[in-house]
Image (cartoon, helix red, strand yellow):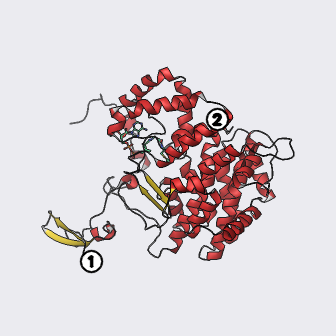
């Protein structure tokens, strides 16, 4: 028995158990031994939303939500955002160490060589209606890649996994930009190998008739920083989906499509879209107090971009993004939405409702304002999240594949439905909705 243990007394039968504590956790399977009789299934942990359940051991991302700390592979997010590039961070996440210059150059070249997508993929995107949501097109196209790269199924081949990682880091911006161009009826723009990762993406998004598209360096860097901030966030909803689908040993494209689908929702990657819509609906600074009142009254409105399952302090990414927003708007021109967001934050952080619940701005509160200032339509916001999250999802998947403790994900349930009952023939069935409650009942 290890030195750290937990003693549990089952008051139902007065039996005592001692279970080991490892890394601040007890194994849920140890609870199974706690039984009232030999027929008893054993005790389970009930944890909807996985509020207090660690499903894996990970060495990728560290978060201290109380202190507002985020680190990738031990490096503080603030240092990476200031000094690094997105591709460097993608490399760090997957390989565990920062690359040397020659390693980074090589990685850069490999990623560049994968940026084109199969011509057939274009036809696939063309098949969507002109008004299809870009995220729907995006995640369907990612899933479709599994039909192009069938070798992706060889998930126990390390070299094969690496190729899919490089391929997907490279192709996500191309797919994203093609989905956008399709939605506005513009011809696709092919990748430009002389541009940086973020500049190439902006070129594929916005290039018109000019021979070469070169974004403003402040906007290019801002996008790179935003990408760095979104690379990984440990076991969030979409990463858990990636691991959940990955646990069935399917190919990484299919798992990535599922992860992107989880990211789509307004409580996760769709939140910055929701922030912008919220600000536009409020319309002006003087109407903010009235909106805050509605949020506090709990009549369905939430202050989008506020609150986080893990951060009970200022989200460190939000702090960096707030600064980036100011720099971008210096270039693109001041936005009334930023003024409203700043005022909203000021009011909320002085209000006991938000303070007592530890609700602070999260990564999504300011990111939408930057994206809008850079010309991205609101529908593209979740796609902009999925591009940089790709190395995070794939690094987590890699870790899962190599972890001998991992099994196919299969939670338990607490069954509260009907006891066994006999099949009722059609003629004997009654629709409860049609039974007249007022009708006299037989006694
Ligand atoms: N506005 C108003 N009240 C809130 C908010 C909010 N944004 N977030 C939480 N609360 C309140 C809840 O009503 C609850 O109050 P109560 O105790 O009086 O019932 C309390 O704070 C705790 O909230 P929960 O919903 O239990 O917190 P949970 O950890 O389940 O949810 C979540 C976290 C989903 C992020 C939530 O804060 C939220 O909906 N925020 C807005 C959406 C958002 O910005 N999502 C992006 C998250 S970051 C990301 O995914 C990249």
The percent position of residue 147, horizontal first and vertical second, equals: 70, 63
Which quadrant is the C terminus positioned in?
top left
Dot 1 corresponds to which residue? 2
Which mark is nearer the camera, 2 or 1? 2
Q: Is the CB of the residue bearing disc 1 within 8 angstroms of ligand 1?
A: no
Q: Are marks 2 and 1 in contact (CB under 8 Å)?
A: no
Name the secondary structure under disc 2. Answer: helix
Q: Which of the 4 image quadrants contains residue 277?
A: top right
Residue for point 79% across, 52% down: 123
Q: Which of the 4 image quadrants contains residue 250?
A: bottom right
Graded by Cα atoms within 10 Å as few (under 14), some (14 to 19) or many (20 or more), the crowding at tag 1 reads few
Given residues 183 and 227, the one toward you in this image is 227
Residue for point 47% across, 48% down: 316
Q: Single out the residue that lies furthest toward the bottom.
A: 1
Name the secondary structure under disc 1. Answer: loop
CA distance separating discs 2 and 1: 58 Å
Residue 57 in view (yes/no):
yes
Question: Residue 330: which disc?
Answer: 2
Residue for point 67% across, 61% down: 168
Given residues 175 and 221, the one toward you in this image is 221
The percent position of residue 128, horizontal first and vertical second, equals: 73, 45
Q: Single out the residue that lies furthest toward the top.
A: 286
Residue for point 32% across, 69% down: 27
The percent position of residue 181, horizontal first and vertical second, equals: 76, 43
Residue 243 to residue 406: above or below:
above
Residue 269 horizontal side relative to residue 185, left or right? left
Looking at the rendering, the quadrant in which ligand 1 lies is top left
Graded by Cα atoms within 10 Å as few (under 14), some (14 to 19) or many (20 or more), the crowding at tag 2 reads few
Question: Residue 19: which disc?
Answer: none
Which quadrant is the N terminus positioned in?
bottom left
Given residues 124 and 118, the one toward you in this image is 118
């Amino acid at each position: 028995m290890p030195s750290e243990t937990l003693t549990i007394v089952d008051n139902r039968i007065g039996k005592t158990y001692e279970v080991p504590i490892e890394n601040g956790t007890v194994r849920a399977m140890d609870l199974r031994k706690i039984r009232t009789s030999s027929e008893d299934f054993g005790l389970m942990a009930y944890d909807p939303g996985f509020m207090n359940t660690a499903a894996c051991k990970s060495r990728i991302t560290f978060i201290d939500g109380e202190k507002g700390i985020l680190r990738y592979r031990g490096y503080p997010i603030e240092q990476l955002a200031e000094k690094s590039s997105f591709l460097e961070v993608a490399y760090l996440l997957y390989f565990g160490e920062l690359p040397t210059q020659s390693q980074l150059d090589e990685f850069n070249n490999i990623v560049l060589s994968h940026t084109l997508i199969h011509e057939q993929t274009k036809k696939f995107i063309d098949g969507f209606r002109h008004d299809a949501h870009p995220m729907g097109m995006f995640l369907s196209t990612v899933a479709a890649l599994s039909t192009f790269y069938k070798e992706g199924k060889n998930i126990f081949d390390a070299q094969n996994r690496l190729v899919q990682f490089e391929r997907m880091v490279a192709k996500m911006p191309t797919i994203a930009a093609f989905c956008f161009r399709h939605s506005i009826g513009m011809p696709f723009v092919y990748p430009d190998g002389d541009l940086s990762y973020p500049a190439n993406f902006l070129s594929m998004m916005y290039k018109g008739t000019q021979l070469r598209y070169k974004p403003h360096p402040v906007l290019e860097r801002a996008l790179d920083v935003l990408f760095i901030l979104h690379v990984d966030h440990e076991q969030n909803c979409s990463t858990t989906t990636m691991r959940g689908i990955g646990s069935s040993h399917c190919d990484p494209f299919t798992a990535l499509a599922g992860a992107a689908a989880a990211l789509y929702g307004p409580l996760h990657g769709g939140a910055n879209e929701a922030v912008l819509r919220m600000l536009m609906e409020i319309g002006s600074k003087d109407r903010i107090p009235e909106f805050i009142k509605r949020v506090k009254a709990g009549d369905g409105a939430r202050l989008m971009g506020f609150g986080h399952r893990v951060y009970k302090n200022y989200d460190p990414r939000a702090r960096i993004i707030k600064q980036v927003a100011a720099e971008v708007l210096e270039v693109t021109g001041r936005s009334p939405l930023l003024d409203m967001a700043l005022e909203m934050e000021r009011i909320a952080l002085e209000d006991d409702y938000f303070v007592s619940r530890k609700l602070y701005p999260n990564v999504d509160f300011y990111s939408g304002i930057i994206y809008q200032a850079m010309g991205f339509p609101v529908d593209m916001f979740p796609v902009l999240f999925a591009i940089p999250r790709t190395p995070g999802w794939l690094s987590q998947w890699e870790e899962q594949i190599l972890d001998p403790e991992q099994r196919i994900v299969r939670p338990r349930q607490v069954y509260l439905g009907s006891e066994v009952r006999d099949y009722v023939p059609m003629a004997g069935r009654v629709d409860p909705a049609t039974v007249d409650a007022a009708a006299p009942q037989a006694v």
